[in-house]
Amino acid sequence: MKALTARTPRTALVTTALALAALTTLLARTIMYGDYFSDPVGLFCWYAACWVLFTLALLALRRVPARSVAWLIAAGAVAVTLTGLTGPPRTSTDSYRYAWDGRVQSAGISPYDQTPQDPALARLRDPWLFPTGAACTGSGLAPIPHTDGTRHCTRINRPAVHTIYPPVAEAYFLAVDQLSPDGARHKPLQIGAALLSLGVTGTLLLILRRRGDDLRKAAYWAWCPAVPLEAVNNAHVDVLGVLLAIAGLGLVASRALTRRAAGGVLIGAAIATKLMPAVVLPGALSGVRRFRDAAAVLLPAAAFAVLSYLPYVLLSHGSVFGYLGGYVEEEGYDDASSGSRYSLLRLVLPDTWAFPVLLVIVAAVSVYVMWRGDPRRPWSGALLVTGWSFVLLTPGYSWYALLLIALVALDGRWEWLGIPLAGAAVYVLAPTLHFQPSLSNIAYGAAAALVLVMTWVRRRARVREAEAATTASGHPHPA
Protein backbone atom coordinates (compact mmCIF):
# COMPACT_ATOMS: atom_id res chain seq x y z
CA MET A 1 0.00 0.00 0.00
CA LYS A 2 2.84 2.39 0.84
CA ALA A 3 4.50 1.69 -2.50
CA LEU A 4 1.22 2.37 -4.30
CA THR A 5 0.75 5.66 -2.40
CA ALA A 6 4.28 6.73 -3.27
CA ARG A 7 3.78 5.96 -6.92
CA THR A 8 0.50 7.90 -7.19
CA PRO A 9 2.03 11.43 -7.03
CA ARG A 10 4.82 10.35 -9.36
CA THR A 11 2.30 8.92 -11.82
CA ALA A 12 0.25 12.12 -11.70
CA LEU A 13 3.37 14.18 -12.32
CA VAL A 14 4.43 12.04 -15.29
CA THR A 15 0.91 12.03 -16.73
CA THR A 16 0.69 15.82 -16.52
CA ALA A 17 4.12 16.23 -18.09
CA LEU A 18 3.16 13.92 -20.96
CA ALA A 19 -0.09 15.81 -21.51
CA LEU A 20 1.85 19.08 -21.59
CA ALA A 21 4.37 17.64 -24.05
CA ALA A 22 1.53 16.55 -26.32
CA LEU A 23 -0.14 19.95 -25.96
CA THR A 24 2.99 21.92 -26.86
CA THR A 25 3.68 19.64 -29.82
CA LEU A 26 0.16 20.07 -31.16
CA LEU A 27 0.23 23.82 -30.56
CA ALA A 28 3.42 24.15 -32.59
CA ARG A 29 1.85 22.02 -35.31
CA THR A 30 -1.27 24.20 -35.28
CA ILE A 31 0.67 27.44 -35.62
CA MET A 32 2.78 26.03 -38.45
CA TYR A 33 -0.25 24.44 -40.14
CA GLY A 34 -1.52 27.44 -42.02
CA ASP A 35 -3.20 30.76 -41.67
CA TYR A 36 -6.64 32.31 -41.45
CA PHE A 37 -7.02 32.32 -45.24
CA SER A 38 -5.61 29.01 -46.50
CA ASP A 39 -7.65 26.42 -44.55
CA PRO A 40 -9.73 27.91 -41.72
CA VAL A 41 -11.68 24.70 -41.08
CA GLY A 42 -8.53 22.60 -40.79
CA LEU A 43 -6.90 25.26 -38.63
CA PHE A 44 -9.84 25.30 -36.21
CA CYS A 45 -9.84 21.49 -36.00
CA TRP A 46 -6.19 21.54 -34.93
CA TYR A 47 -6.96 24.32 -32.47
CA ALA A 48 -9.92 22.41 -31.00
CA ALA A 49 -7.68 19.37 -30.55
CA CYS A 50 -5.32 21.60 -28.54
CA TRP A 51 -8.20 22.44 -26.23
CA VAL A 52 -8.84 18.74 -25.68
CA LEU A 53 -5.23 18.19 -24.63
CA PHE A 54 -5.43 21.34 -22.48
CA THR A 55 -8.40 19.81 -20.66
CA LEU A 56 -6.54 16.53 -20.14
CA ALA A 57 -3.52 18.38 -18.74
CA LEU A 58 -5.74 20.27 -16.28
CA LEU A 59 -7.38 17.04 -15.12
CA ALA A 60 -4.00 15.40 -14.59
CA LEU A 61 -2.76 18.44 -12.67
CA ARG A 62 -5.45 17.91 -10.03
CA ARG A 63 -3.58 14.85 -8.70
CA VAL A 64 -0.13 16.46 -8.69
CA PRO A 65 1.16 17.12 -5.13
CA ALA A 66 0.93 20.75 -4.05
CA ARG A 67 4.70 21.03 -3.60
CA SER A 68 5.26 20.36 -7.32
CA VAL A 69 2.47 22.52 -8.75
CA ALA A 70 4.22 25.91 -8.95
CA TRP A 71 7.29 24.78 -10.86
CA LEU A 72 5.22 22.51 -13.11
CA ILE A 73 2.88 25.36 -14.05
CA ALA A 74 5.85 27.68 -14.67
CA ALA A 75 7.69 25.12 -16.82
CA GLY A 76 4.52 24.37 -18.76
CA ALA A 77 3.89 28.08 -19.24
CA VAL A 78 7.33 28.55 -20.79
CA ALA A 79 6.86 25.58 -23.13
CA VAL A 80 3.33 26.59 -24.18
CA THR A 81 4.31 30.23 -24.64
CA LEU A 82 7.31 29.42 -26.83
CA THR A 83 5.10 27.62 -29.34
CA GLY A 84 3.71 31.02 -30.29
CA LEU A 85 7.13 32.01 -31.62
CA THR A 86 7.31 29.17 -34.15
CA GLY A 87 5.82 31.15 -37.03
CA PRO A 88 4.66 34.57 -38.22
CA PRO A 89 1.22 35.83 -37.15
CA ARG A 90 -1.33 33.31 -38.40
CA THR A 91 -4.82 34.62 -37.81
CA SER A 92 -4.43 38.37 -37.38
CA THR A 93 -2.50 41.23 -38.96
CA ASP A 94 -2.94 43.65 -36.06
CA SER A 95 0.69 43.42 -34.97
CA TYR A 96 1.76 44.92 -38.31
CA ARG A 97 -0.09 48.09 -37.35
CA TYR A 98 1.71 47.99 -34.00
CA ALA A 99 5.07 47.83 -35.77
CA TRP A 100 4.10 50.74 -38.01
CA ASP A 101 2.88 52.89 -35.13
CA GLY A 102 6.15 52.27 -33.32
CA ARG A 103 8.17 53.18 -36.40
CA VAL A 104 6.19 56.41 -36.91
CA GLN A 105 6.67 57.45 -33.29
CA SER A 106 10.41 56.77 -33.47
CA ALA A 107 10.47 59.33 -36.29
CA GLY A 108 8.89 61.90 -33.94
CA ILE A 109 5.44 61.79 -35.56
CA SER A 110 2.13 61.23 -33.82
CA PRO A 111 0.59 57.89 -34.85
CA TYR A 112 -2.85 59.54 -34.75
CA ASP A 113 -2.14 62.16 -37.43
CA GLN A 114 -1.64 60.22 -40.67
CA THR A 115 -2.71 56.91 -42.13
CA PRO A 116 -0.23 54.22 -43.24
CA GLN A 117 -0.97 54.89 -46.92
CA ASP A 118 -0.33 58.64 -46.61
CA PRO A 119 2.40 59.55 -49.15
CA ALA A 120 3.93 61.92 -46.58
CA LEU A 121 5.13 58.86 -44.62
CA ALA A 122 6.48 56.94 -47.61
CA ARG A 123 10.07 57.43 -46.41
CA LEU A 124 9.29 55.37 -43.31
CA ARG A 125 7.99 52.34 -45.18
CA ASP A 126 9.92 49.11 -44.64
CA PRO A 127 9.81 46.60 -47.53
CA TRP A 128 8.57 43.81 -45.24
CA LEU A 129 5.54 45.91 -44.22
CA PHE A 130 5.04 47.53 -47.63
CA PRO A 131 5.84 45.00 -50.40
CA THR A 132 5.85 46.03 -54.05
CA GLY A 133 5.48 44.37 -57.41
CA ALA A 134 5.23 40.58 -57.47
CA ALA A 135 5.46 40.44 -53.66
CA CYS A 136 1.95 41.90 -53.52
CA THR A 137 0.38 38.60 -54.52
CA GLY A 138 -1.14 36.51 -51.77
CA SER A 139 -3.66 36.81 -48.99
CA GLY A 140 -3.64 39.31 -46.16
CA LEU A 141 -2.22 42.18 -48.24
CA ALA A 142 -4.08 45.46 -48.74
CA PRO A 143 -3.43 47.58 -51.87
CA ILE A 144 -2.36 51.19 -51.42
CA PRO A 145 -2.45 54.05 -53.98
CA HIS A 146 0.61 54.49 -56.20
CA THR A 147 1.69 56.69 -59.10
CA ASP A 148 4.91 55.06 -60.31
CA GLY A 149 3.32 52.22 -62.28
CA THR A 150 4.46 49.60 -59.76
CA ARG A 151 1.98 47.71 -57.64
CA HIS A 152 2.13 48.70 -53.95
CA CYS A 153 0.53 46.99 -50.96
CA THR A 154 0.86 46.60 -47.20
CA ARG A 155 0.45 43.92 -44.55
CA ILE A 156 -1.35 46.49 -42.39
CA ASN A 157 -5.12 46.09 -42.33
CA ARG A 158 -7.25 49.16 -42.96
CA PRO A 159 -4.29 51.26 -44.23
CA ALA A 160 -6.63 54.13 -45.14
CA VAL A 161 -7.71 54.80 -41.54
CA HIS A 162 -5.96 56.26 -38.50
CA THR A 163 -4.76 54.09 -35.66
CA ILE A 164 -7.26 53.10 -32.97
CA TYR A 165 -4.95 52.22 -30.08
CA PRO A 166 -4.87 54.15 -26.77
CA PRO A 167 -1.72 55.86 -25.43
CA VAL A 168 -0.27 53.12 -23.19
CA ALA A 169 -0.44 50.72 -26.13
CA GLU A 170 1.25 53.31 -28.35
CA ALA A 171 3.99 53.83 -25.74
CA TYR A 172 4.53 50.05 -25.76
CA PHE A 173 4.79 50.01 -29.57
CA LEU A 174 7.37 52.79 -29.38
CA ALA A 175 9.40 50.94 -26.75
CA VAL A 176 9.44 47.74 -28.81
CA ASP A 177 10.52 49.64 -31.93
CA GLN A 178 13.31 51.39 -30.04
CA LEU A 179 14.63 48.08 -28.70
CA SER A 180 14.32 46.19 -32.00
CA PRO A 181 17.34 45.55 -34.23
CA ASP A 182 17.09 46.34 -37.93
CA GLY A 183 15.40 43.62 -39.96
CA ALA A 184 13.74 42.00 -36.95
CA ARG A 185 10.32 42.21 -38.63
CA HIS A 186 7.51 40.73 -36.50
CA LYS A 187 9.66 38.92 -33.95
CA PRO A 188 10.21 41.71 -31.37
CA LEU A 189 6.48 42.16 -30.87
CA GLN A 190 6.02 38.40 -30.48
CA ILE A 191 8.89 38.18 -27.98
CA GLY A 192 7.53 41.16 -26.05
CA ALA A 193 4.11 39.51 -25.95
CA ALA A 194 5.66 36.23 -24.78
CA LEU A 195 7.37 38.02 -21.89
CA LEU A 196 4.12 39.77 -20.96
CA SER A 197 2.25 36.47 -21.09
CA LEU A 198 4.76 34.86 -18.74
CA GLY A 199 4.43 37.96 -16.57
CA VAL A 200 0.71 37.27 -16.29
CA THR A 201 1.46 33.70 -15.18
CA GLY A 202 3.90 34.95 -12.56
CA THR A 203 1.41 37.55 -11.30
CA LEU A 204 -1.34 34.94 -11.02
CA LEU A 205 0.91 32.60 -9.05
CA LEU A 206 1.96 35.44 -6.75
CA ILE A 207 -1.61 36.54 -6.02
CA LEU A 208 -2.82 32.99 -5.46
CA ARG A 209 0.12 32.14 -3.19
CA ARG A 210 -0.31 35.26 -1.06
CA ARG A 211 -3.95 34.41 -0.55
CA GLY A 212 -3.23 30.77 0.27
CA ASP A 213 -5.32 29.74 -2.73
CA ASP A 214 -4.87 26.74 -5.01
CA LEU A 215 -2.00 27.48 -7.41
CA ARG A 216 -3.46 25.05 -9.94
CA LYS A 217 -5.87 27.78 -11.04
CA ALA A 218 -2.98 29.62 -12.73
CA ALA A 219 -2.81 26.82 -15.31
CA TYR A 220 -6.09 28.06 -16.79
CA TRP A 221 -4.04 30.91 -18.23
CA ALA A 222 -0.55 29.43 -18.36
CA TRP A 223 -1.51 26.42 -20.48
CA CYS A 224 -4.54 27.76 -22.37
CA PRO A 225 -4.18 27.35 -26.18
CA ALA A 226 -5.58 30.86 -26.73
CA VAL A 227 -2.55 32.42 -25.06
CA PRO A 228 0.23 31.24 -27.43
CA LEU A 229 -1.97 31.84 -30.46
CA GLU A 230 -3.56 35.20 -29.66
CA ALA A 231 -1.20 36.76 -27.11
CA VAL A 232 2.12 35.51 -28.53
CA ASN A 233 1.84 34.46 -32.17
CA ASN A 234 -0.54 37.26 -33.12
CA ALA A 235 1.16 39.50 -30.51
CA HIS A 236 -2.07 41.22 -29.55
CA VAL A 237 -1.49 44.14 -27.20
CA ASP A 238 -4.44 42.90 -25.16
CA VAL A 239 -1.93 40.84 -23.14
CA LEU A 240 -0.41 44.05 -21.77
CA GLY A 241 -3.85 45.21 -20.67
CA VAL A 242 -4.44 41.80 -19.06
CA LEU A 243 -1.20 42.01 -17.05
CA LEU A 244 -2.02 45.51 -15.80
CA ALA A 245 -5.64 44.65 -14.96
CA ILE A 246 -4.77 41.45 -13.07
CA ALA A 247 -2.01 43.15 -11.10
CA GLY A 248 -4.41 46.01 -10.35
CA LEU A 249 -7.12 43.66 -9.04
CA GLY A 250 -4.53 41.92 -6.88
CA LEU A 251 -3.74 45.24 -5.21
CA VAL A 252 -7.38 46.31 -4.96
CA ALA A 253 -8.08 43.16 -2.91
CA SER A 254 -6.06 44.75 -0.09
CA ARG A 255 -7.75 46.76 2.67
CA ALA A 256 -5.00 49.38 2.65
CA LEU A 257 -6.07 52.53 0.78
CA THR A 258 -2.60 53.08 -0.65
CA ARG A 259 -2.54 49.61 -2.20
CA ARG A 260 -6.08 50.07 -3.52
CA ALA A 261 -5.03 53.38 -5.06
CA ALA A 262 -2.02 51.70 -6.68
CA GLY A 263 -4.40 49.05 -8.02
CA GLY A 264 -6.58 51.83 -9.44
CA VAL A 265 -3.56 53.28 -11.26
CA LEU A 266 -2.80 49.90 -12.84
CA ILE A 267 -6.42 49.40 -13.88
CA GLY A 268 -6.35 52.89 -15.41
CA ALA A 269 -3.22 51.91 -17.31
CA ALA A 270 -4.98 48.76 -18.52
CA ILE A 271 -7.90 50.85 -19.78
CA ALA A 272 -5.44 53.18 -21.52
CA THR A 273 -4.01 50.10 -23.25
CA LYS A 274 -7.12 48.58 -24.82
CA LEU A 275 -10.28 50.19 -23.26
CA MET A 276 -11.90 46.79 -22.70
CA PRO A 277 -10.39 46.29 -19.19
CA ALA A 278 -12.85 48.96 -18.04
CA VAL A 279 -15.26 46.04 -17.50
CA VAL A 280 -13.27 45.01 -14.40
CA LEU A 281 -14.14 48.25 -12.58
CA PRO A 282 -17.41 46.93 -11.06
CA GLY A 283 -15.42 43.97 -9.74
CA ALA A 284 -12.81 46.33 -8.30
CA LEU A 285 -15.65 47.98 -6.35
CA SER A 286 -17.05 44.69 -5.02
CA GLY A 287 -18.69 45.16 -1.64
CA VAL A 288 -17.56 48.79 -1.34
CA ARG A 289 -19.76 50.71 1.10
CA ARG A 290 -17.75 53.88 1.74
CA PHE A 291 -17.18 56.68 -0.73
CA ARG A 292 -13.48 56.94 0.08
CA ASP A 293 -12.93 53.25 -0.70
CA ALA A 294 -14.55 53.69 -4.10
CA ALA A 295 -12.70 56.94 -4.76
CA ALA A 296 -9.39 55.29 -3.85
CA VAL A 297 -9.82 53.08 -6.94
CA LEU A 298 -11.82 55.21 -9.37
CA LEU A 299 -9.95 58.50 -9.07
CA PRO A 300 -6.44 57.09 -9.71
CA ALA A 301 -7.80 54.96 -12.55
CA ALA A 302 -9.51 57.91 -14.23
CA ALA A 303 -6.58 60.25 -13.61
CA PHE A 304 -4.05 57.90 -15.15
CA ALA A 305 -6.24 57.08 -18.15
CA VAL A 306 -6.84 60.76 -18.89
CA LEU A 307 -3.31 61.99 -18.23
CA SER A 308 -1.79 59.26 -20.39
CA TYR A 309 -3.45 60.89 -23.39
CA LEU A 310 -1.89 64.28 -22.66
CA PRO A 311 1.49 63.76 -24.41
CA TYR A 312 -0.29 62.58 -27.55
CA VAL A 313 -2.79 65.43 -27.41
CA LEU A 314 0.14 67.87 -27.36
CA LEU A 315 1.97 66.03 -30.15
CA SER A 316 -1.01 65.40 -32.43
CA HIS A 317 -2.77 67.75 -34.83
CA GLY A 318 -5.94 65.67 -35.04
CA SER A 319 -8.10 63.49 -32.79
CA VAL A 320 -6.30 61.04 -30.52
CA PHE A 321 -9.26 58.67 -30.73
CA GLY A 322 -8.34 57.75 -34.30
CA TYR A 323 -10.62 55.22 -35.97
CA LEU A 324 -12.50 54.30 -32.78
CA GLY A 325 -15.86 55.65 -33.93
CA GLY A 326 -15.49 54.07 -37.35
CA TYR A 327 -14.57 50.74 -35.77
CA VAL A 328 -17.68 50.74 -33.58
CA GLU A 329 -19.82 51.38 -36.65
CA GLU A 330 -17.94 48.85 -38.78
CA GLU A 331 -18.38 46.07 -36.23
CA GLY A 332 -22.10 46.70 -35.90
CA TYR A 333 -22.10 47.71 -32.24
CA ASP A 334 -24.26 50.75 -33.00
CA ASP A 335 -26.59 48.93 -35.41
CA ALA A 336 -27.48 45.40 -34.34
CA SER A 337 -29.00 44.55 -37.70
CA SER A 338 -25.72 45.09 -39.59
CA GLY A 339 -23.74 42.15 -38.21
CA SER A 340 -23.64 39.25 -35.77
CA ARG A 341 -23.29 41.35 -32.61
CA TYR A 342 -25.85 40.71 -29.85
CA SER A 343 -26.82 37.52 -31.70
CA LEU A 344 -28.27 35.71 -28.66
CA LEU A 345 -30.35 38.72 -27.67
CA ARG A 346 -31.59 39.07 -31.23
CA LEU A 347 -32.98 35.54 -31.11
CA VAL A 348 -35.68 36.72 -28.71
CA LEU A 349 -35.75 40.51 -29.16
CA PRO A 350 -36.19 42.98 -32.03
CA ASP A 351 -32.85 44.25 -33.33
CA THR A 352 -33.49 47.76 -32.03
CA TRP A 353 -33.97 46.43 -28.49
CA ALA A 354 -30.71 44.50 -28.35
CA PHE A 355 -28.34 47.26 -27.28
CA PRO A 356 -30.64 48.90 -24.67
CA VAL A 357 -31.41 45.51 -23.13
CA LEU A 358 -27.71 44.67 -23.05
CA LEU A 359 -27.01 47.90 -21.18
CA VAL A 360 -29.74 47.13 -18.65
CA ILE A 361 -28.51 43.59 -18.02
CA VAL A 362 -24.84 44.55 -17.72
CA ALA A 363 -25.77 47.44 -15.43
CA ALA A 364 -27.83 45.09 -13.26
CA VAL A 365 -24.96 42.57 -13.04
CA SER A 366 -22.55 45.40 -12.20
CA VAL A 367 -24.79 46.71 -9.41
CA TYR A 368 -25.17 43.18 -8.04
CA VAL A 369 -21.39 42.73 -8.02
CA MET A 370 -20.75 46.09 -6.36
CA TRP A 371 -23.41 45.46 -3.71
CA ARG A 372 -22.98 41.73 -3.02
CA GLY A 373 -19.46 41.03 -4.26
CA ASP A 374 -16.58 39.94 -2.04
CA PRO A 375 -14.06 42.82 -1.68
CA ARG A 376 -11.36 40.25 -0.93
CA ARG A 377 -11.98 38.62 -4.33
CA PRO A 378 -12.63 41.49 -6.77
CA TRP A 379 -11.76 39.23 -9.71
CA SER A 380 -14.85 37.09 -9.04
CA GLY A 381 -17.14 40.05 -9.66
CA ALA A 382 -14.99 41.17 -12.59
CA LEU A 383 -15.36 37.70 -14.14
CA LEU A 384 -19.14 37.84 -13.76
CA VAL A 385 -19.44 41.24 -15.46
CA THR A 386 -16.88 40.41 -18.17
CA GLY A 387 -18.33 36.99 -18.89
CA TRP A 388 -21.92 38.13 -19.31
CA SER A 389 -20.78 41.10 -21.37
CA PHE A 390 -19.19 38.64 -23.79
CA VAL A 391 -22.25 36.39 -23.86
CA LEU A 392 -24.50 39.34 -24.71
CA LEU A 393 -22.13 41.16 -27.09
CA THR A 394 -21.03 37.96 -28.91
CA PRO A 395 -17.82 39.61 -30.20
CA GLY A 396 -16.28 38.33 -33.40
CA TYR A 397 -12.62 38.62 -32.35
CA SER A 398 -11.26 35.80 -30.22
CA TRP A 399 -8.35 37.70 -28.64
CA TYR A 400 -10.74 39.91 -26.70
CA ALA A 401 -11.29 36.96 -24.35
CA LEU A 402 -7.68 36.96 -23.08
CA LEU A 403 -8.82 39.11 -20.17
CA LEU A 404 -11.58 36.66 -19.31
CA ILE A 405 -9.11 33.73 -19.31
CA ALA A 406 -6.91 35.50 -16.76
CA LEU A 407 -9.93 36.22 -14.56
CA VAL A 408 -10.87 32.54 -14.70
CA ALA A 409 -7.34 31.71 -13.56
CA LEU A 410 -7.82 33.87 -10.45
CA ASP A 411 -11.39 32.81 -9.71
CA GLY A 412 -11.39 29.14 -10.69
CA ARG A 413 -14.78 28.89 -12.41
CA TRP A 414 -13.51 26.99 -15.44
CA GLU A 415 -16.88 26.92 -17.21
CA TRP A 416 -16.32 30.47 -18.46
CA LEU A 417 -13.51 29.14 -20.69
CA GLY A 418 -16.19 28.09 -23.16
CA ILE A 419 -16.42 31.72 -24.23
CA PRO A 420 -12.83 32.01 -25.58
CA LEU A 421 -13.38 28.79 -27.54
CA ALA A 422 -16.69 30.12 -28.87
CA GLY A 423 -14.99 33.35 -29.93
CA ALA A 424 -12.32 31.41 -31.80
CA ALA A 425 -14.93 29.36 -33.63
CA VAL A 426 -16.78 32.51 -34.71
CA TYR A 427 -13.62 34.31 -35.79
CA VAL A 428 -11.96 31.48 -37.72
CA LEU A 429 -15.01 29.81 -39.27
CA ALA A 430 -17.22 32.85 -40.01
CA PRO A 431 -15.77 33.62 -43.48
CA THR A 432 -16.19 29.98 -44.56
CA LEU A 433 -19.79 29.98 -43.37
CA HIS A 434 -20.46 33.37 -45.00
CA PHE A 435 -20.79 35.10 -41.62
CA GLN A 436 -24.06 33.37 -40.82
CA PRO A 437 -25.48 34.51 -37.43
CA SER A 438 -26.27 30.88 -36.67
CA LEU A 439 -22.57 30.21 -36.06
CA SER A 440 -22.44 32.86 -33.35
CA ASN A 441 -25.74 31.63 -31.89
CA ILE A 442 -24.52 28.04 -31.64
CA ALA A 443 -21.03 28.83 -30.34
CA TYR A 444 -21.95 31.45 -27.76
CA GLY A 445 -25.21 29.70 -26.94
CA ALA A 446 -23.32 26.53 -26.02
CA ALA A 447 -20.87 28.56 -23.94
CA ALA A 448 -23.71 30.31 -22.09
CA ALA A 449 -25.48 26.98 -21.49
CA LEU A 450 -22.31 25.54 -19.94
CA VAL A 451 -22.07 28.52 -17.59
CA LEU A 452 -25.73 28.24 -16.55
CA VAL A 453 -25.52 24.49 -15.96
CA MET A 454 -22.35 24.74 -13.88
CA THR A 455 -23.81 27.66 -11.91
CA TRP A 456 -26.78 25.46 -11.02
CA VAL A 457 -24.49 22.52 -10.16
CA ARG A 458 -22.32 24.68 -7.89
CA ARG A 459 -25.37 26.13 -6.16
CA ARG A 460 -26.80 22.67 -5.55
CA ALA A 461 -23.47 21.56 -4.12
CA ARG A 462 -23.44 24.49 -1.70
CA VAL A 463 -26.99 23.67 -0.58
CA ARG A 464 -26.02 20.03 0.07
CA GLU A 465 -22.96 21.13 2.02
CA ALA A 466 -25.11 23.45 4.14
CA GLU A 467 -27.58 20.64 4.78
CA ALA A 468 -24.78 18.25 5.74
CA ALA A 469 -23.28 20.83 8.09
CA THR A 470 -26.66 21.48 9.71
CA THR A 471 -27.26 17.76 10.18
CA ALA A 472 -23.81 17.27 11.69
CA SER A 473 -24.45 20.07 14.19
CA GLY A 474 -27.59 18.33 15.45
CA HIS A 475 -30.02 21.00 14.27
CA PRO A 476 -32.73 20.13 11.72
CA HIS A 477 -32.43 21.87 8.35
CA PRO A 478 -35.37 24.25 7.83
CA ALA A 479 -37.81 23.22 5.17
Image (cartoon, grey):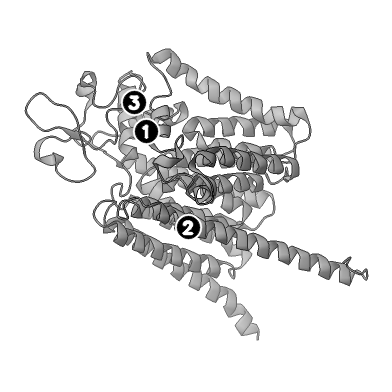
Q: Position of residue 307 (x, y in %)?
A: 53, 20
In which quadrant will I find the C terminus?
A: bottom right
Disc 2: which residue: 223
Disc 1: which residue: 176
Image vertical order of residue 311 relative to residue 24, above or below: above
Pick whichever, 398 or 247, lies toward us.
398
Gap in angstroms between the C-alphas marked 1 and 2: 25 Å
Mark 3 lies on a secondary structure that is loop
Sequence-wise first label, 3 or 2:
3
Circles 1 and 2 in contact, beta carbons < 8 Å: no
Mark 1 lies on a secondary structure that is helix
Gap in angstroms between the C-alphas marked 3 and 2: 35 Å
Q: Position of residue 62 (x, y in %)?
A: 59, 67
The residue type indicated by label 2 comes to: Trp
Disc 3: which residue: 162
Taking the spot 26% from the left edge, 38% from the top edge, the residue there is 185
Pick whichever, 126 or 116, lies toward us.
116
Taking the spot 41% from the left edge, 51% from the top edge, the residue there is 437
Sequence-wise first label, 1 or 2:
1
The residue type indicated by label 3 comes to: His
Q: Which mark is residue 146?
A: none
Name the front one of labels 1 and 2: 2
Mark 2 lies on a secondary structure that is loop
Q: Position of residue 373 (x, y in %)?
A: 72, 45
Q: Is residue 370 left or right of residue 400?
A: right
